[in-house]
Amino acid sequence: MKPRFITLEGGEGVGKTTNLAFMESYLRTRGVDLVRTREPGGTPLGECIRGLLLDSGTMTGATELLLVFAARAQHLNEVIRPALAAGQWVLCDRFTDASYAYQGGGRDLDTKVIGFLEQWVQDGLQPDLTLLLDTPIEIGMSRAKERGVTDRFESEHLGFFEKVRMAYLDRAEQYPDRIRRVDASGSLEQVQAGIAVHLEQLLTRSV
Ligand code: TMP
């Protein structure tokens, strides 16, 4: 099987953690050798950068964007490219679509700048499949609040998350072959059935 690069995206409280575990076990059951990782993070340096991003006080949008790409450059070099080269699949909790959604949408940063960084750091590498867990903001936010912990992003206002969601949906429209929207407002069984359809398609894809 050709090694695949899969990313999972979505706003706050969409159930990424639970569904990522489901995806991992679904793929492992099908005999896939995979590396599960996350952004920002995934390397010792990337995890330090994650700490800065989530726990610092105020930060300019430009600082934020450069930090996520700094972590990504390291992650690609240390984890993602070596795993794919070794024939392993990569399952990543968030990737560059999150930069378009949070920094481009949420922070209103110029997407041309994001595109430049994307090209520079990724050099053409894109996920084979991105699942976008999507739910109305109110549902996601109330689930996130139940979790109790609030980091620098989670403490943003509703308007910020509306813009994040819109930017994600725009991306899904722009890249319909790669980004598949999964309705995350239903029951866990429904959401996971939706995810499984896309994983099956990828498992049986010949190119
Ligand atoms: P999470 O992994 O718990 O969702 O937290 C990561 C946070 O980082 C999340 O609020 C979204 C944010 N983020 C960005 O703003 N830009 C990015 O490029 C990535 C990967 C994450």
Image: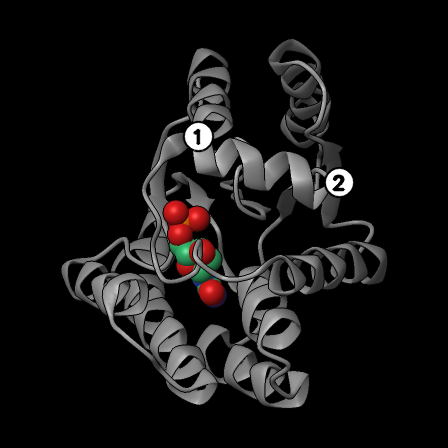
Which image quarter holds the C terminus?
top right
Mark 2 surroundings within 10 Å by alpha-carbon count, few (fewer than 14), some (14 through 19), many (20 or more): many
Q: How many marks?
A: 2
How packed mark 1 is, by other alpha carbons closer than 10 Å (few <14, some 14-19, many 20 or more), is few
How was the colour assigned to the protein in this rendering? one colour
Q: Position of residue 50 (x, y in %)?
A: 27, 62
Q: Nearer the viewer, residue 45 or 102?
A: 102
Give amino acid for label 1: Glu
The vertical placement of 31 against 110, above or below, is: above
Q: Secondary structure at mark 1?
A: helix
Which image quadrant is residue 53 in?
Answer: bottom left
- Residue drawn at x 57%, y 82% is 114
In the displayed structure, 93 sits above or below 25; it is: below
The answer to whether the residues at label 2 and label 1 have Cβ atoms under 8 Å apart is no
Residue 181 image label: 2
Which mark, by number, is residue 133? none
Nearest to the observer: residue 68 or residue 103:
103
Q: Position of residue 158 (x, y in %)?
A: 62, 57
- Depth check: 12 or 111 in front? 12
Q: Residue at x 70, y 37 (%)?
A: 135
